[in-house]
Image: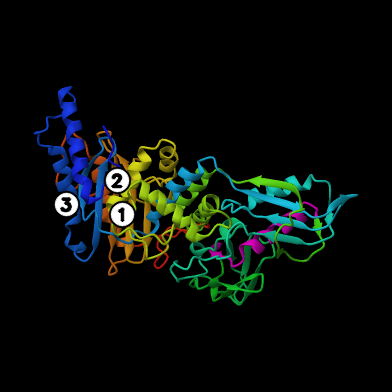
């Protein structure tokens, strides 16, 4: 049977006809129903889903829903499926698909070290250059591997300076289409050609031993790039936790300003912040690690400068493979990784330096090929940290179907998605239901938007693609999740032997409590940057 990947409204009748012809073929071999047979199982699913979404509490909610059987290549349910809606972080699915498709699952970035000098008697007479390749997975442990390689190069001191080169990507660190809220939060980390620790820092807070003492504050890693302005006090035991911390940009450094109070005896607390200058942050960490390995650099600070064409390479580090980077992006909804991949696509496909417009052009080209770039489709961000993207439920299932039909992409894309009740942004959802462990989906949440797109294996063994887009400025987006959870349960229960009942069985574990915050990750989640951490 020929697959119908792109299914805009104008050609859905063709797809349906193809499915009916396939059903006829199955009937002739005794493995399916005849053309005229009533599909009571599909009708039962439609009734269940209609019951879920006809709730009067959703009267003001703009909905777009589609369910598509990947196994049978046929649509099962549609509700305003062609309506273009804001979809938040679910657009990371497109970014992941295009990156895997165009760059390949084994693609790696390279971070390199150069010198313009020579080594004599254990001394490097010249400068060191740390050149970024756009690696979004360069973290403390991996940078230390590069330092270890350099430690075997035969020198213990550098007479010159340390320079950092991040010109493989452009110098626009924060996409102009991002939401302008909580700008020092980790989810809003800048993007650079040389980045470190997702361009974030984790700061730990501990009370002093007595009332009135200053609390102890530890930025991690403490490389000297982050300074601390501690104006807080330790307060009486049993009192409220009232520390307020913020990141203040400086000249080549960032400062964590801490005010308020933390009571005696309270356990360690922590917060995640982004930093302002990715390349300088990475350079200072590199210097700090070199010093820990006994290599001293005469220059006092890292500065930005391009690597001279005549410089000699001393060492290089390959990143994690793209398949693992995409998993980090989707499991934890990292805006930083998503925007970095968009720029990397622009660089590799359209030419250096990588820019957001170049990368978005590549995404749109692929979206057109799979039938996603249709009516109402608007793409200004590959991370989804914007209100300006517009995508329909049917366009998302077209994307999932394109991945399903492309074995070079499918395994990696599916393994990158959060698993219901088990990990990532779905770790706390759909526990105690048939969707537990069998539904994989990319969530999307900003103020006024809650969405989930993915696949689920039904009880009958079918692989179903689904998309649920919900836009409602009158509701906290977290309050929209119960309907999505019941939806996931219905798809997981679907089979072609026993029709579903119209009303789902109420399960306490399906509906999340109103306050179920999940700690923010250094990777840059939360999914709801304008509300409680989710």
Pick the quarter of the image with the N terminus. Answer: top left
Residue 275 belongs to magenta span: yes
Between discs 2 and 3, the one toward the N terminus = 2
Q: Which residue is mark 3?
A: 50
Location of residue 36 (image quadrant): top left
Question: Residue 434, how many percent across, how many down?
Answer: 28, 41
Between discs 1 and 3, the one toward the N terminus = 3
Q: CA distance from mark 2 to mark 3?
A: 25 Å
Q: Is residue 13 left or right of residue 338?
A: left
Q: Which residue is mark 1?
A: 374
Residue displayed at 72% across by 55% down: 289
Q: Is residue 287 left or right of residue 78?
A: right
> Start and end of the magenta stretch?
266-295
Q: Is residue 532 above or below residue 420?
A: below
Pointer 3 local density, CA inside 10 Å: few below 14, some 14–19, many at least 20 = some
Question: Residue 229, how many percent across, how many down?
Answer: 63, 74
Q: CA distance from mark 1 to mark 2?
A: 9 Å
Q: Which residue is mark 2?
A: 6
Mark drawn on residue 438 = none
Residue 384 belongs to magenta span: no
Q: Is residue 382 above or below residue 412?
A: below
Which mark is in front, 1 or 3? 1
Question: Along the line of sight, which residue is nearer the eye, 259 or 108?
Answer: 108
Question: Residue 17, how many percent across, how many down?
Answer: 18, 38
Question: Along the line of sight, which residue is nearer the eye, 116 or 65?
Answer: 116
Find out whether the residues at labels 1 and 2 contact each other: C-beta distance under 8 Å: yes
């Amino acid at each position: 049977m020929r697959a119908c990947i792109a299914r805009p409204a104008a050609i859905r009748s063709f797809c349906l006809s193809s499915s009916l012809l396939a059903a006829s073929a199955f009937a002739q071999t005794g493995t399916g129903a005849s053309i005229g047979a009533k599909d009571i199982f599909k009708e039962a699913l439609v009734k269940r889903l209609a019951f879920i979404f006809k709730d009067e509490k959703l009267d003001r909610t703009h909905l777009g829903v589609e369910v598509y059987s990947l196994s049978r290549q046929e649509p099962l349910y549609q509700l305003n499926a062609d309506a273009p809606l804001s979809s938040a972080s679910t657009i990371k699915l497109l970014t992941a698909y295009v990156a895997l498709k165009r760059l390949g699952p084994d693609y790696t970035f390279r971070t390199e070290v150069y010198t313009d000098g020579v080594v004599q008697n254990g001394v490097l007479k010249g400068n060191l250059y740390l050149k970024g390749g756009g690696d979004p997975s360069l973290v403390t442990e991996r940078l230390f591997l590069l330092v270890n390689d350099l430690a075997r190069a035969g020198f213990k001191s550098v007479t010159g300076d340390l320079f950092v080169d991040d010109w493989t990507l452009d110098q626009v660190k924060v996409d102009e289409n991002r939401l302008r809220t909580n700008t020092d939060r980790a989810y809003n980390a800048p993007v650079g050609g040389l980045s470190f620790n997702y361009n974030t820092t984790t700061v730990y807070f501990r009370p002093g031993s007595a009332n009135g003492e200053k609390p102890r504050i530890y930025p991690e890693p403490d490389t000297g790039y982050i300074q601390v302005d501690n104006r807080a006090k330790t307060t009486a035991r049993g009192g409220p936790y009232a520390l307020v911390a913020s990141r203040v940009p400086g000249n080549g450094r960032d400062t964590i300003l801490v005010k308020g109070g933390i009571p005696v005896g309270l356990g360690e607390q922590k917060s995640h912040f982004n930093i302002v200058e990715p390349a300088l942050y990475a350079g200072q960490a590199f210097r700090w690690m070199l010093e820990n390995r006994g290599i001293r650099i005469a220059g006092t600070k890292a500065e930005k400068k391009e690597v001279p064409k005549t410089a000699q390479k001393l060492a290089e580090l390959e990143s994690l493979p793209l398949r693992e980077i995409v998993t980090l992006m989707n499991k934890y909804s990292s805006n930083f990784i998503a925007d970095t991949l968009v720029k990397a696509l622009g660089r590799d496909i359209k030419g250096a330096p990588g820019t957001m417009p170049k990368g978005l052009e590549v995404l749109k080209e692929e979206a057109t090929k799979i039938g996603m770039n249709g009516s109402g489709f608007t793409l200004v961000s590959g991370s989804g940290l914007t209100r300006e993207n517009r995508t329909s439920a049917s366009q998302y299932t077209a994307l999932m179907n394109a991945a399903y039909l492309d074995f070079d992409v499918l395994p990696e894309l599916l393994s990158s998605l959060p698993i219901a009740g088990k990990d990532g942004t779905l770790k706390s959802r759909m526990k105690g239901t048939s969707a537990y462990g069998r539904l994989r989906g990319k969530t999307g949440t900003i103020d006024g938007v809650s969405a989930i797109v993915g696949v689920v294996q039904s009880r009958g063994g079918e692989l179903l693609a689904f998309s649920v887009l919900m836009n409602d400025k009158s509701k906290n987006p977290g309050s929209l999740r119960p309907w999505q959870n019941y939806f996931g349960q219905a798809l997981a229960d679907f089979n072609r032997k026993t029709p579903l009942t119209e009303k789902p069985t109420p399960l306490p574990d399906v509906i999340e409590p109103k306050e179920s915050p999940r700690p923010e990750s250094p990777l840059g989640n939360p999914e709801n940057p304008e509300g409680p951490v989710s």
